[in-house]
Amino acid sequence: MIRKAAAVVLLVLTGLLALAWLVSPVEPVAWTPPATAPLEGPYAPNQRLQPVEWWARELVGPEAITIAPDGALLAGLKDGRVVKLKVGVDTPEVIADTKGRPLAMAFHPDGRLIICDAHGGLMALGPSGKLETLATEQGGLPFHFVDDLAITKDGTIYFSDASARNSIERFTEDLLEHQTTGRVLKYVPGSKELTRVAEGFAFANGVALSGDESFLVVAETGTYQLWRLWLQGPKAGQKELFTDSLPGFPDNVRWSASRNGFWVAIGSPRKPALDLLADWPNVRRIVAALPDALQPKPARHAYVLLVDLEGRPVESFQRNAPDSYSPIASATEHEGWLYLGSFAREGVARFKLP
């Protein structure tokens, strides 16, 4: 009787797994993760990211954070609104609504606010409050997930399209698939010329310019790596590995003039189980079909990392606690503070750098 019951259970389980495989929303590919970096030195666990000032908690998902010329803070929210608020003040002023998901913003030399909207593409908000769409596709391939940007002193805009397959609502599926369809693009406002700078990223995320604008740093979230794209000099046009084997999933990247390096927001630590499944695409296909309750969840681990001009880790600020401001999606330095944004947390926060 026990054998019959076990056989029935096994048969049912096999049928459910087969059904999950058939209805799975993803098409994973095999890949080889970089070796896990030892959690020592700059990567050693710590609780340095405290205390933080945290306010405007009615604002949900303020991933897009930038500082206005007048010192006010601008944030793009999960519901599509772009708001302006003063530090410590809980009453925001709505200055735009993209009707999408603004993920990154920066001021252009001509005074416009350039916005990366996951749904709307590359956009610009003029001083009068008029919202304009600059680009929604390149080379016949529509944008699926416009993510982050960096703007040169002459006004050239570099930005990332995280995936050519999945929208922001399916970012977990994109990580499970590990298809390398992310790309980095260049937009010249004067001529409206749009070109592809680099491609082949497994989730192209953060984009930052070096201080001398000789290269870009691009976060490849799916591989725990940072890449350098040379814009000037003898290596112009080349793509090379900048930081290998980060301790977690890198999100946005921001230049720090005071520290002559880059702030990297780490959304969550690496998941050993996900790495173990790297060479098992069919298993990941089944995992993607599981109910949300059974899907892996990110740890509540706030993490910001500083890397130098050669991509070497310098120091990290972390806090692993249920009440930490995490996941952190961006860390923008201004006048000795790190302003923190999150794609999921409520409110905005800042941390006084030592």
Image (cartoon, helix red, strand yellow):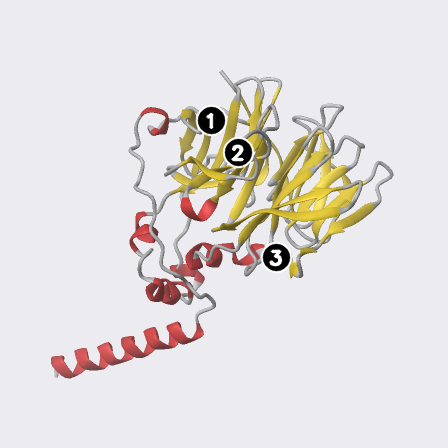
Determine which quarter of the picture holds residue 8.
Answer: bottom left
Disc 2 marks a residue whose amino acid type is Lys
Badge 2: residue crowd in 10 Å (few <14, some 14–19, many ≥20):
few
User: Residue tagged by mark 1?
Assistant: 306
Q: Pick the residue in front: 283 or 237.
A: 237
Compared across the picture, whether 279 is left or right of 265 comes to left
Compared across the picture, whether 323 is left or right of 153 comes to left
Disc 1 marks a residue whose amino acid type is Leu
Residue 111 place in picture, x, y as percent = 80, 32
Label 2 with label 3: CB-CB less than 8 Å: no
- Relative vertical location of residue 314 with respect to residue 267 in this rendering, above or below: above
Determine the residue positioned at 12% across, 79% down. 2
Residue 45 place in picture, x, y as percent = 34, 29
Badge 2 element: loop
User: Residue tagged by mark 2?
Assistant: 235
Determine the residue positioned at 63% across, 43% down. 159
- Relative vertical location of residue 294 with respect to residue 54 in this rendering, above or below: below
Badge 1: residue crowd in 10 Å (few <14, some 14–19, many ≥20):
many
Mark 2 or 3, nearer chain start: 3
Q: Quadrant of the N terminus?
A: bottom left
> How much space separates mark 2 and mark 3, taking CA atoms?
30 Å
> How much space separates mark 2 and mark 1, taking CA atoms?
24 Å
Q: Pick the residue in front: 273 or 149.
A: 149
Disc 3 marks a residue whose amino acid type is His
User: Residue tagged by mark 3?
Assistant: 144
Q: Pick the residue in front: 83 or 255.
A: 255
